[in-house]
Amino acid sequence: MIAEASPDARLSRTVGKVPSPIVTRGRAEPGSYEGSLGALDFSSAASWLTRVKRLKRWMYVGIATDTHYVGLAVVRLGYAANAFAFAFDKAKKTMVMDEKLILPLPAVEVADTTGPGARAAFAFRGKSITLARVAGRDAFELTTRLPGLHLDAELSAEGAPSAISAVASTEGGLFTTTEKRLLLTTRGDARIAGERVSLDGGLAGYDFTAGFMPRHTHWKWAFLLGKVDGVPFGMNLVEGFVKEAECAAWFDGRLWPLSEGDIRFTQKDGPWDVRTQAGEIDLRFDPGGAHEDNTNLGIVRARFLQPVGLYRGSVRLGRRTLELRDMLGVTEDQSVVW
């Protein structure tokens, strides 16, 4: 449902246009930008050893249909690599597949762009994920071959609202970048836990992140995709790390910057309160399952929890208040020393 808010309702913050190029002589200006990052070049930003230790890249994709949510990621660190994929059945309110892989570096590729030449992929022991930019188009082809998830899809951003991109300073005079874009339209088919699922008419979004992460990095995240009275809606919120610079909603053909997230939970299988510090967002998230990873290798330690489930509540965008019901998405709590 969409309602008119009072005339004095607080408007969303504004963002600038992405500088071109965004990385100049190994540096990038911190800020929040509308549009894609473009091609990144980290070669002059730090020494080879620093790039090995601290440069991280990943591509996360979420797809929501009327019946399922699929989340997957390909992650390449300077010294290690991994990937995961999971699927959630909305009617059953449960995870129906969940796969995580530790991979050899040569098997994994994550390009430094979402533009022409973009690619995030791995192939190892008969399992694979490939996301590649379609030549000459603002679209991606996605294929997966995993136990419980065979997927062939096109994710088209043609006609979708702009991405939000952010640059943040990190320790040692370095920086990290992230680009989030939602409301890509999907076309294709998937076989999820043996069930054929059409992806036609679904919605997708991605998180492309590349940069020099702090030794200890922690954030909470909220991400959702769906429709309000038939109009596509998406949201990306983060609490901590990059903060409000990457927080936004996508609705009615435009990007709506938001204030920093205020994301709280007490137990991983219990409800989450998802709000913003300026009050534009007031949502409850009820998980139906979770992808998680707890790793302790001494110098590398990670606690990663990504529940998947349903959102409901209100969103204020300028003068309009949207009421969300049973909208698919995820939350995340991550704390990593890497």
Image (cartoon, grey):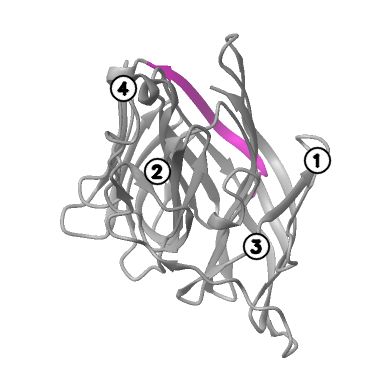
Please state which of residues 77 and 96 is positioned toward the viewer in this rendering: 77
Label 3 vs label 2: CA separation? 36 Å
Q: Are marks 1 and 2 in contact (CB under 8 Å)?
A: no
N-terminal of the pair, mark 1 or mark 4, is 4
- What residue does disc 3 label? 259
Label 3 vs label 1: CA separation? 25 Å
- What residue does disc 2 label? 190
| Magenta-span inclusion, residue 154 | no
Q: Secondary structure at mark 1?
A: loop
Q: Amino acid at mark 4?
A: Trp
**In the rendered image, which quarter is residue 61 located in?**
top left
Label 3 vs label 4: CA separation? 36 Å
Q: Amino acid at mark 2?
A: Ala
Q: Of the residues tagged 3 and 1, which is closer to the observer?
A: 3
Q: Secondary structure at mark 3?
A: loop
As drawn, is 269 to the left or to the right of 324?
right
Instruction: Write down the region rendered in magenta.
Output: 91-103
